[in-house]
Amino acid sequence: MLSMLPTLINATATLAALTGAFYTAGVASVAAVSVLSRNPGRRRDARETLKILRRRRTR
C-alpha cells in the first residue's frame, strides 16, 4: 500500500493542476467575452458571470 503512495500523490497533484488550469481558462474566456463582445447584453451577462466566478467566500 505504501509503495503506491507516491503515484497517488503525483496523480492527485496532476489533477489539481489541471483543474486549476481549466478554471483559469474559463475565467479568462468569460473575461474576454465581457470586453470584446459587440452585443451589450452579452457583455453585461459575461460581467455578471465573472462576478459569480470571482466571488470570495467570507465567513
Image (cartoon, rainbow, N blue to C red):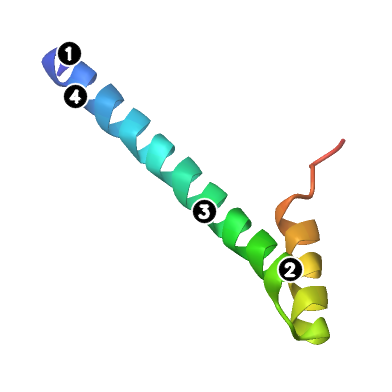
Viewer-proximal residue among 29 and 49: 29
Q: What whole-number distance in Å separates the C-alpha atoms at marks 3 and 2?
A: 14 Å
Classify residue 15 as left or right of residue 22: left
Q: Secondary structure at mark 2?
A: helix
Report the disc number at residue 2. 1
- Residue receiving disc 3: 25
**Mark 1 or mark 3, whichever is nearer to me:** 3
**Residue sticking out furthest to the right:** 59
Q: Give the mark nearer the N terminus: 2 vs 1.
A: 1
Classify residue 12 as left or right of residue 47: left
Viewer-proximal residue among 27 and 10: 27
5 is higher (above) or lower (below) than 17:
above
18 is higher (above) or lower (below) than 36:
above
Q: What whole-number distance in Å separates the C-alpha atoms at marks 2 and 1?
A: 49 Å
- Residue receiving disc 2: 34
Q: Amino acid at mark 1?
A: Leu
Q: Give the mark nearer the N terminus: 3 vs 2.
A: 3
Asked if the residues shown at circle 4 and circle 3 are in contact, with their CB atoms under 8 angstroms apart, the answer is no
Relative image position of residue 22 (x, y in whole percent): 46, 51
Q: What whole-number distance in Å separates the C-alpha atoms at marks 4 and 3?
A: 27 Å
Which residue lies at the image location 74% right of the left edge and 60% below the top edge? 50
Report the disc number at residue 7. 4
Q: Amino acid at mark 4?
A: Thr
Q: Give the mark nearer the N terminus: 4 vs 3.
A: 4
Relative image position of residue 10 (x, y in whole percent): 26, 25
Q: Give the mark nearer the N terminus: 1 vs 3.
A: 1
Q: What whole-number distance in Å separates the C-alpha atoms at marks 1 and 3?
A: 35 Å
Q: Give the mark nearer the N terminus: 2 vs 4.
A: 4
**Mark 3 or mark 2, whichever is nearer to me:** 2
Which residue lies at the image location 55% right of the left edge and 58% below the top edge? 26
Asked if the residues shown at circle 4 and circle 1 are in contact, with their CB atoms under 8 angstroms apart, the answer is no
Q: Secondary structure at mark 4?
A: helix
